[in-house]
Image: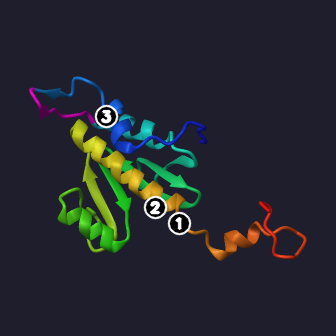
């Protein structure tokens, strides 16, 4: 799904997506898994270049090209990060080790409250930004070379 809207910083857009009335007296209130999934899915799928797929173990998966940004299962989100980033997220209390692969770069994040759903959106955005700003592999760059054989890209 492509979206021509300008990119919105996550902290600003996340607050608009979480349904109003989920906080009572300043304390986070629970969210139903379907509600949390809808809030996160609506935001992440609106970003340019993000496609939505069925995840092989159930749930919904988000990708940019062939790279998975993460996926949702019920009331949890699973996201892949470089190991150093994963360790920092866990140390900061923003994520837990992955529920199945605890020694990998994957993390698991609960989505039981509106604040947790907003945190999940921020982590998806972090993965998205890392993915769209990553240098293209040589193979992808070679595909952009014009047929002239002079090493000029189509953009020149």
Residue reaching furthest to the right: 148
Mark 3 secondary-structure assignment: helix
Mark 1 nearby-residue class (10 Å; few <14, some 14–19, many ≥20)? few
- Prevailing SS of the magenta stretch: loop
Of residues 50 and 99, which is closer to you in this image? 50
Q: Is residue 71 left or right of residue 93?
A: right
Mark 2 nearby-residue class (10 Å; few <14, some 14–19, many ≥20)? few
Q: Do the residues labelled 1 and 2 touch (CB within 8 Å)?
A: yes
The span from disc 1 to disc 2 (Cα, nearest Å) is: 6 Å
**Residue 66 x/y as whole percent:** 57, 61
Q: Residue at x 24, y 36 (%)?
A: 114
**Does label 2 or label 3 sit earlier along the sequence?**
3
Q: Give the range drawn in magenta.
A: 25-32
Q: Is residue 61 visible?
A: yes
**Residue 133 x/y as whole percent:** 52, 61
The span from disc 1 to disc 3 (Cα, nearest Å) is: 27 Å
Residue that label 3 marks:
15
Residue that label 1 marks:
134
Residue that label 2 marks:
130
Residue reaching furthest to the top: 21
Q: Which residue is drawn at 46% across and 52% down?
A: 55
Q: Residue at x 41, y 43 (%)?
A: 9
| Residue 120 lies within the magenta run | no
- Colour convention: rainbow
Quarter-of-image position of residue 84? bottom left
The span from disc 2 to disc 3 (Cα, nearest Å) is: 22 Å
Q: Which residue is drawn at 44% across and 36% down?
A: 42
Of residues 152 and 98, which is closer to you in this image? 152
Mark 1 secondary-structure assignment: loop
Of residues 128 and 68, which is closer to you in this image? 128
Q: In this view, does 57 lie to the left or right of 24?
A: right
């Amino acid at each position: 799904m492509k979206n021509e809207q300008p990119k919105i910083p996550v902290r600003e857009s996340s607050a608009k997506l979480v349904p109003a009335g989920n906080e009572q007296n300043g304390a986070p209130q629970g969210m139903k898994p379907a509600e949390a999934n809808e809030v996160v899915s609506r935001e992440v799928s609106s970003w340019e270049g993000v496609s939505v797929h069925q995840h092989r173990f159930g749930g919904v998966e988000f990708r940019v090209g062939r790279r998975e940004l993460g996926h949702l299962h019920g009331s949890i989100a699973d996201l892949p990060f470089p190991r150093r980033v994963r360790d920092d997220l866990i140390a900061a209390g923003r994520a837990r080790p992955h529920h199945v692969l605890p020694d990998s770069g994957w993390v698991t994040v609960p989505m039981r409250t509106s604040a947790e759903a907003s945190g999940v959106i921020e982590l998806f955005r972090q993965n998205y930004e890392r993915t769209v700003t990553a240098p293209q592999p040589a193979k992808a760059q070679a595909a952009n070379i014009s047929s002239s054989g002079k090493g000029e890209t189509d953009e020149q």
